[in-house]
Amino acid sequence: MDARNVRLTLAYDGTDFCGWQRQKSDRTVQQVVEDALERMLGEPVRVQAAGRTDSGVHATGQVINFRTASTSIPADRWAVALNSYLPEDVQVVSAGLAPDSFDSRRSALARGYRYQILNGGARLPHLRRYCFRVRAPLDVGYLNRAAAQLVGEHDFAVFAAAGDASASTVRRVLSASFYPAVPFLVFRIVATSFLWRMVRSIVGTLVELAEQSAPPGDVGDLHGQ
């Protein structure tokens, strides 16, 4: 019997996960999802993801796929069925069959991150896990001029975390900008792929430059524009 190629879109709260990728001992999203699928289907399952999120990173549209010979669950029931086996901090938001050629990692055209900054104001306890708090007022115009320097194909080695195993540190950023979304100032970046902890490093660097009133063009100097 030919295996079906199943595509799922996940949402998860990354607070209590050590990132996406399965590890020997730490709790990860991949491990939790694969274990749930094995319990549901009665067979080992390995899933492929469009991107590997880091520890503490949340997702609203993480696309994964896997293959199974099981036909006991209709495609339109996959989300309901699997959610009954998953913990509350990771759930399936949509599911369906994909063409045999679909591969969530290789078929993805771009990945996007949304980084939330709580800029000034009162400390809001219920948001502490979902934002980066910066007390000093930030100049959105300045930040956008700096972020514009990231767009294009550049060597982002300076923004990679130590231990990144990527064969190349060159990445292509399609868009990068800041915008207000009360109570946050949001940084949105889309690229074909990212280095390990690249987005966190970019946000920290841009905020630091803004606080120092450094020329926005300094960002271009950092990645060798």
Image: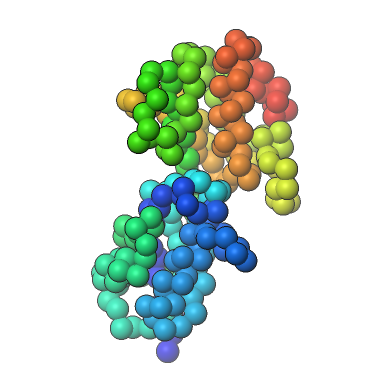
Give the image location of residue 194, x and y in percent.
59, 44
Q: Residue at x 27, y 76 (%)?
A: 74
Where does the N terminus fall, quadrant-wise? bottom left
Give the image location of residue 184, x and y in percent.
38, 27
Q: Residue at x 44, y 77 (%)?
A: 38
217 to 96, vertically: above or below: above
Give the image location of residue 197, x and y in percent.
61, 42
Give the image location of residue 202, x and y in percent.
59, 31
Front in this rendered view, residue 11 or 73: 11
Where does the C terminus fall, quadrant-wise? top right
Q: Quadrant of residue 204?
A: top right
Q: Quadrant of residue 162?
A: top right
Q: Which residue is at the far bottom?
A: 1
Q: Is 217 displayed left or right of 4 in the figure?
A: right
73 to 213, vertically: above or below: below
Can residue 123 be seen at all in this image of the molecule? Answer: yes
Q: Residue at x 62, y 66 (%)?
A: 24
Q: Residue at x 52, y 59 (%)?
A: 28
Q: Quadrant of residue 79?
A: bottom left
134 to 79, vertically: above or below: above
Can residue 105 be seen at all in this image of the molecule? Answer: no
190 to 95, vertically: above or below: above
Front in this rendered view, residue 148 or 211: 211
Q: Is 219 displayed left or right of 144 in the figure?
A: right
| Colour mapping | rainbow
